[in-house]
């Protein structure tokens, strides 16, 4: 979590290298990590091991750590299982989601600084994006410049914007720097039985966080037409209003999803939790004396 908050993959690569050297010195050739599963649920018991909620940032940071660590000769073991989002029923849970969700997820980003930064001169030259960032405050400071791509209107539902690049810059008061990003096909692609690009005009947005977009421009992109499914019109996935219905969710999944029956007395197994047995177990109903609490 702390490493992800820096947005500094060079620093994280140096950390990976240091850990790799320490592991080899201790006779360890395989290090369990980094954890780049995305934080999808605040109740996830392994969230402290993960880098961020965003797949792009988590992937870039994890790749840097692995490069640094494996440069020493120590191997990395990427963690964890995809969709590992909760501790409840950890051994026998069934996390169901459509394939597109498994491959995409969503963007974010926010940071604080003791100085101020101004953005100017946003340019797009082919697939290269550049922007000038100036420290307009009175003290030295660091800024995470973030690049978001907004999809064309119509077609398959997509987020309002998706993180597709970021860079960490440190500037003296009054100092300016041009930050450059390179876009590729994956910057515009979505999953629809394979990675595909919807043709149209995409927004190129730059800012200091997903909630603080400073400059915008557009870029035309050639691709194919990806029409929206008939069930999408007016659904939660298009309006983001209210709560998604089970019917629309099953339409998104492409198949009905069975509802598991509530466990009852006589049907409990080693996979059931104490909480599930609380209304049926005499032991679970017994009050716990204060004297037995751990101090």
Image (spheres, rainbow, N blue to C red):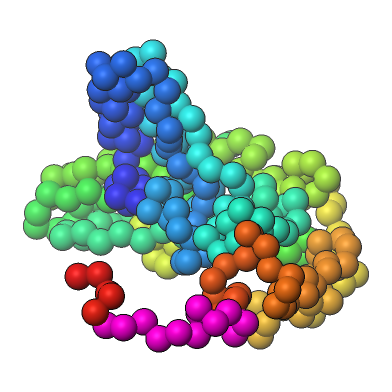
Query: For residue 293, what is the image quadrant?
Result: bottom left
Relative to 21, does residue 279 appear above or below in the rendering?
A: below
Q: Can residue 213 be seen by looking at this rendering?
A: no
| Residue 234 location (% of width, % of height) | 79, 80
| Residue 77 location (% of width, % of height) | 48, 30
Direction from residue 244 to residue 33 in the image, left or right: left
Q: Residue at coordinates 49% horizontally, 60% vertically from top-left?
A: 44
The one of 70 and 258 positioned closer to us in this rendering: 258
The span picked out in magenta is 279-290
The one of 210 and 92 positioned closer to us in this rendering: 92
Q: Residue furthest left?
A: 138
Query: For residue 64, what is the image quadrant?
Result: top left
Q: Residue at coordinates 71% horizontally, 49% vertically from top-left?
A: 190
Quadrant where the C terminus sits is bottom left
| Residue 3 location (% of width, % of height) | 32, 45
Q: Can residue 253 be seen by looking at this rendering?
A: yes
């Amino acid at each position: 979590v702390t490493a992800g908050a820096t947005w500094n993959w060079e620093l994280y690569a140096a950390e990976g290298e240091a850990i790799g050297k320490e592991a080899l010195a201790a006779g360890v050739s395989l290090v369990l990590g980094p954890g780049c599963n995305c934080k999808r649920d605040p109740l996830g018991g392994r969230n402290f091991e993960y880098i961020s909620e965003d797949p792009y940032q988590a992937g870039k940071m994890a790749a840097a750590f692995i490069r640094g660590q494996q440069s020493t000769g120590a191997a990395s073991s990427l963690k964890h299982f995809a969709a590992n989002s909760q501790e409840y029923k950890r051994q026998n849970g069934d996390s169901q989601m459509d394939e597109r969700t498994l491959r995409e997820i969503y963007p974010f980003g926010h940071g604080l600084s003791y100085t101020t930064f101004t953005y100017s001169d946003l340019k797009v030259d082919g697939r290269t994006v550049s922007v000038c960032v100036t420290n307009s405050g009175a003290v030295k400071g660091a800024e995470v410049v973030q690049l978001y791509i907004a999809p064309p209107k119509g077609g398959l539902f997509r987020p309002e914007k998706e993180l597709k690049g970021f860079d960490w810059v440190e500037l003296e008061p009054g100092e300016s720097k041009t930050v450059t990003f390179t876009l590729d096909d994956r910057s515009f692609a979505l999953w629809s039985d394979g990675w595909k690009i919807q043709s149209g005009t995409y927004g190129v947005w730059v800012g200091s966080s997903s909630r603080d977009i400073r400059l915008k421009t557009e870029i035309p992109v050639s691709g194919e037409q990806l029409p929206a499914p008939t069930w999408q019109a007016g659904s939660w996935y298009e309006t983001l209003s209210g709560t998604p219905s089970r019917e629309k969710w099953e339409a998104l999944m492409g198949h009905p999803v069975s509802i598991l029956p509530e466990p009852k007395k006589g049907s409990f197994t080693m996979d059931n939790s104490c909480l599930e047995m609380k209304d049926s177990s005499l032991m679970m109903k017994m009050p716990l004396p204060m004297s037995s609490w751990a101090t």
